[in-house]
């Protein structure tokens, strides 16, 4: 039976602590990426809903706060936690293109804004 030399004692503890630290960092990175993906999905949903609201106003199905398709889009985007970055209603084709921006929460906010665009109107 061999006996460990004094300098080998405790090496397993250091190895386990290193592995545990790496797992904690991996879990934190996964959380940050999850927050970023969630922000992207929120931006996509907000853009879709804002474009639909603007198209409804443009087609005369409903009235916006001031009768403007872009005002309706901005209101719906704000309810969904997004900011309108572009709204382009096209009266000739009764379509509207809306772009929104969402800031991720927590540490993922340092990654920048999640952006999405949607187009709505008859036959789109």
Image (cartoon, rainbow, N blue to C red):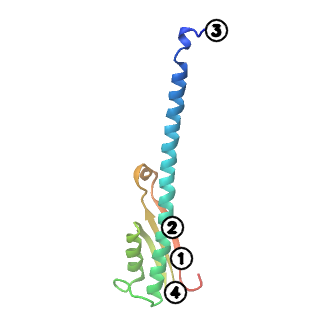
Q: CA distance from mark 2 to mark 1?
A: 11 Å
Q: CA distance from mark 4 to mark 1?
A: 11 Å
Q: CA distance from mark 3 to mark 2?
A: 64 Å
Q: Is label 3 in contact with label 1 (beta carbons under 8 Å)? A: no
- Secondary structure under the numbered disc 4 in the rendered image: loop
* Mark before the other along the chain sequence, 2 or 1: 2
Q: CA distance from mark 3 to mark 1?
A: 74 Å
Tell me the quadrant of the picture where the N terminus can be found: top right
- Secondary structure under the numbered disc 3 in the rendered image: loop
Q: Quadrant of residue 68?
A: bottom left
Label 3 Cα neighbours within 10 Å, binned few <14 / some 14-19 / many ≥20: few
Horizontal side, residue 33 vs residue 67: left or right: right
Q: Is label 2 in contact with label 1 (beta carbons under 8 Å)? A: no
The residue that mark 1 highlights is 119
The residue that mark 2 highlights is 44
Q: Is label 2 in contact with label 4 (beta carbons under 8 Å)? A: no
Residue lying at the far front of the rendered structure:
1
Q: Nearer the viewer, residue 103 or 89?
A: 103
- Secondary structure under the numbered disc 1 in the rendered image: strand
Q: CA distance from mark 3 to mark 4?
A: 84 Å
The residue that mark 4 highlights is 94
* Mark before the other along the chain sequence, 3 or 1: 3
Q: Which mark is residue 18?
A: none
Q: Is residue 90 above or below residue 6?
A: below
The residue that mark 3 highlights is 2
Q: CA distance from mark 2 to mark 4?
A: 21 Å
Q: Residue at x 54, y 19 (%)?
A: 11
Instruction: For marks 3 and 1, give the one nearer the viewer.
Output: 3
């Amino acid at each position: 039976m061999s006996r460990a030399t004094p300098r080998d004692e405790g090496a397993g503890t250091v190895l386990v602590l290193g592995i545990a630290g790496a797992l904690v960092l991996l879990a934190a990175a996964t959380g940050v990426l999850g927050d970023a993906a969630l922000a992207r999905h929120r931006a996509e949903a907000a853009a879709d809903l804002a474009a639909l609201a603007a198209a409804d106003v443009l087609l005369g199905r409903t009235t916006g706060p001031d009768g403007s398709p872009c005002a309706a889009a901005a209101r719906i985007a704000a309810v969904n936690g997004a900011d309108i970055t572009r709204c382009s209603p096209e009266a000739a084709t009764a379509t509207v293109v809306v772009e929104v921006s969402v800031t991720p929460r927590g540490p993922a906010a340092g990654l920048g804004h999640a952006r999405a665009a949607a187009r709505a109107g008859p036959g789109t």
